[in-house]
Amino acid sequence: MKVDVQSLDTFNQLAHEGAEAATRSLTQMTGIEATVDVTRISLLDREDVGEELRGTAFAGVQFGFEGALAGETVLVFEEKRVGDIVEALMPGGCADESMAQSGVEEIGNIMMSGFIDGWAEHLNATIDHTPPTYIEREGAAVVPDGPETGARDQVFVFRSEIEWAGEDVNFYIYMLPGYGSMAELLAEHVDTAGDAIPIEKLAVFNQMTREGAAKAAENVQMMSGIETEAEVAQLSFVPIEDVPRQFGEDTYVGTVVEFTGTPSGFLLVLFDEASAVTVAEALLPVEPDSDGLTEQHESAVTELGNIMTSGFVDGWANVLQQSVDHTPPRLVHDMGQAIIDPLAAQLGRHQRHAFIIDARMQTDEVDFESEIHALPNEQELRAALDELVVDRADQLEADAEQIF
Amino acid sequence: MKVYDGSQSDDGPEAEPERVKVGIAEYEVTADDAELTTSGLGSCVGVALYDTETGAAGLVHVMLPVAEEMDEGKAAKFADSGTQLLIDELHAIGANPRTVQAKIAGGSDMLDFSEGGSGIGDRNVEQVRATLAENDIPIVDEDVGGDHGRSLRLEAASGDLVVKSANREKRTL
């Protein structure tokens, strides 16, 4: 089964419109002015779904759906804001816990009916959904199990983030369709046969990313002694103008390179400020002169970014059997969204959509978290995947040591 | 796209102004003293228009210089069509073309890997200037270029454009 940019775009848009319909229902019912911030379709390992929710308690509702598309979906928000949301629906309602719960159920039911109905209408098919189940869970556990899969099986996930205007409250919609039914639907919507990519190859790309990130993590450990693990590898697809939206206003420190070859593109290694200080100090032979992020820290981060980039890119090059070169790293220290914006703009001169490749690594020992993001030229990525013999993926599993 | 014309607001005079977020390749206009915000401008440019007579205001967040080579309908993504769209929409909610003025921010040249010629940030700024000039709209203040990102807040009550950056002092244009 194959997938092309057109079919991915269609479904991304569909999920976005579904989330907008859900948001309109919310506004009508509660007067809460909210907007859909970003929607993306991603392919990733089942065990990595919802990783970005780590450390926060959520409440919301869960549904199953079946028909033209089958799977599970949730609408959740931070548990500590349940009171505000229920209060907006029925003033005084949050005093009573069971009332609060039924308020959440009602909001969830109305929003998600809009979401599912939007899909059914577009697909011109019937999608039934089960009654809502109220859930309260921690972090990634809030994401539904989805169709039965192994932890390392690849799943498609639609994720929308909805922002309550002027309040620090976000609603998240996760939708996990069955891989089979989703792949079939995507394949049905392919309209440019020449550009289509077999879906399995997208999954191979995630495997490459995971291995590349593992190599980068090894390099971090070798240089800094900080033992870290590659946690997430995912491939997402969004309109080009939505690329910067995936990053917030939080400040990051890190490096950016342009890589050339097939594919060409940009690669970012980013640390939050605290992690940058931690990892730089692990590299510095002597205590820095002053607190905070000094020039010494920045030069250590540049060095680390360089070696992580090399590890990552070498991993790719080996699997693709293409040489991938990269420019020297440029140090960045700015708002995440502002860092990615010029890169998206440079790609945006030639393409309307982008694949974003994300990997994340972290460690429990010290305050350390690092992200690697690649933004490949979309046409060249397609060409590279076209060249890729899927057999090499098996070789990768069997002989990863040798390849990377 | 929503137009905030005040008809939906039941807030009293002391209520905080409504805050409306403008995403990349989006725009908003207000005749209702709302605060229009946009974040994370790198090479993107934020164009803020304010009518000194009626108080109507608008903000667009453009990403690329010219629309002509891209086959698509998202006008607010481009400096030329996005700026023009904002001007037209501001007129549509009653702004007086003769009393509208502009403030612009963004267009940084950070992380521009293009070889030779001017980068996307510069070209975005130049195109915004050209489109504003064609419409006889003066730029009364600006914070453009450099190698850092910016977030903007347009306070429609006053026409002030507040520019925030990660590593420097806040500026008000």
Image (cartoon, grey):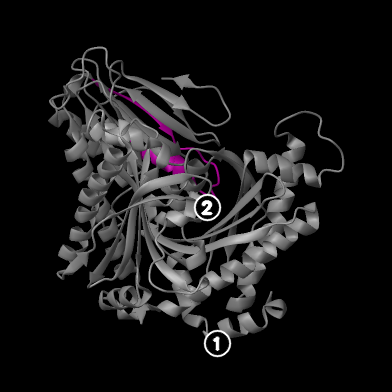
Q: Which residues are magenta?
A: B100-129
- Image location of residue A185, percent across then percent down: 28, 75
Asked if residue A377 shows in the view, the reply is: yes
Q: Which quadrant would the N terminus of chain A be assigned to in this image?
A: bottom left
Q: Nearer the viewer, residue A351 or A40?
A: A40
Q: Is residue A52 above or below residue B145?
A: below
Q: Nearer the viewer, residue A11 or A196?
A: A11
Number of numbered discs visible in the structure rendering: 2
Q: Chain of mark 2?
A: B
> Is residue B106 magenta-colored?
yes
Quadrant in the picture for residue A189: bottom left
Q: Which quadrant would the C terminus of chain A be assigned to in this image?
A: bottom right
- Image location of residue A272, percent across then percent down: 61, 42
Secondary structure of the residue carrying numbered label 2: loop
The amino acid sitting under disc 2 is Ser
Residue at mark 2: B114
> Is residue B104 magenta-colored?
yes
> Which label was assigned to residue A391?
1
Q: Residue at x 63, y 63 (%)?
A: A213
